[in-house]
Amino acid sequence: MLRVNENYLKLRGSYLFSEIAKRVAAFKDSHPEARLVRLGIGDVTRPLTKSIISSLHHSVDEMAQEETFRGYAPDLGYAFLRETIAQEVYAKRRCEIAADEIFVSDGAKSDLGNLAEIFAESCRVAITDPVYPVYVDSNVMAGRAGSFNESTSQWDRLTYLPTTAENSFVPALPDTELDLIYICSPNNPTGTALRLAELQQIVDYAIAHHSVILFDAAYEAYISESDIPHSIYECQGARQCAIEVRSFSKNAGFTGLRLGYTVIPKELKDAEGHSIHAIWARRHGTKYNGAPYLVQRAGQAVYSPEGQQEVQELVSYYMHNAKLIREGLSHCGYTVYGGVNAPYIWLKVPEGLSSWAFFDRLLHEAQVVGTPGLGFGPSGEGYLRLTAFSTPENTEEALKRIAAMG
């Protein structure tokens, strides 16, 4: 008898951003004249830079010639990109990562979701709260989340690690044993970041308890403070316990091109000594045919001197918007976090309002779109996420409208 995977039936309603899209569409239908300012979904808005475009054009021309045409990419990705990443990202930060420990993919979101496949259903999973929804939903799909508790808005098999203003956005690790720990720093949605000593404590816990950390470093390019690690491999012992996932989307604007990579050190093993590197390599080669050649060449161009300068200009552009939002909202009397090492601002909503209620108020009274904090987990209630991925003009317009709300 044909049946679907019952774990998919446990997923909660619409995906967060789908629900936002529905509410925004309904508002636009009833207010067609309204001009919305969107500070919700974290999609970049600046065009691809000159170095990237030049590389794409050159690669397209290569694909038109028999001598330089490329078909399927190698399983791990082209050596030219993996070797460039090993040198320019890791060696320059004195992190010991070899090129064959890097797996090129079509983005961090895909890898973060797919990594759930290679671990046993019995694994005990911890997530920071609030959290990027993919971490939770992919484990629901994998059968690790258990049942959803309506009263607590939590899954009963997941361990929640609150990261709130009360603990300075540093997750407190439990005394209980954990197998998988999801960490995102700089953090989406709070916009805060772990300092080296704070991240080292999590690594030490993972080593002591034989846990694996799934470290999402998608926003490392936005780090401005010197004591914030760009990679978990800056921590001692991290090669024994950590998988790092990175993206080209937010640093170089590849949200439309799709490119990312995952690092799995060869000494990372499960309790029975099985190589996680080898298992992921087998999964990767079986289910994935590789990012396109021209996209991987464009990724390589990101690490050229010109490419790095252009990335810094993009980051500065968005972080200028983040500063506008952070300072503008503070001037209006709001309590805000983030916006220093990440392009996200975590806004505490006015007393007496839920995060969805404040989302609706912003939409209807100011025509500004944010992201309600509850969509990121129970500890997100009472907050709203705003992003810096807009223009300075739109950012300033949004602040004027918010200020006019009173």
Image (cartoon, grey):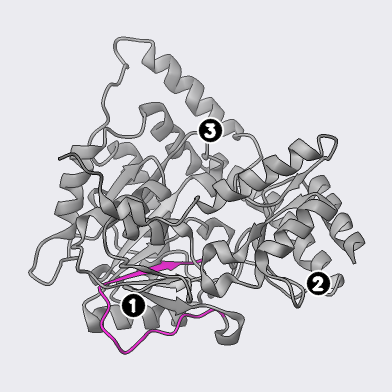
On screen, residue 279 versus residue 399, left or right, reads left
Q: Which amino acid type corresponds to the residue marked 3 in the rendered image? A: Ile
- Residue 80 position, x and y percent, is 32, 37
Which quadrant, please, contains the C terminus?
bottom right
Q: Residue at x 48, y 45 (%)?
A: 248
Which quadrant, please, contains the N terminus?
top left
Within 10 Å of disc 3 (Cα), the crowding (few <14, some 14-19, many 20+) is many
For marks 3 and 2, give the CA distance.
37 Å
Q: Which residue is mark 1?
A: 203
State the count of labels.
3
The answer to whether one can see residue 189 in this image is no
Mark whose residue sits in front, 3 or 1: 1
Q: Quadrant of residue 155?
A: bottom left
Labelled pair 1, 2 in contact (Cβ < 8 Å) = no
On screen, residue 23 versus residue 54, left or right, reads right
Mark whose residue sits in front, 3 or 2: 2
Q: Main secondary structure of the magenta part?
A: loop
- Residue 292 position, x and y percent, is 36, 29
- Residue 255 position, x and y percent, is 52, 40
Identify the element where label 3 is drawn. helix
Q: Which residue is mark 3?
A: 52
Q: Which residue is mark 2?
A: 330
The magenta span reads 169-186
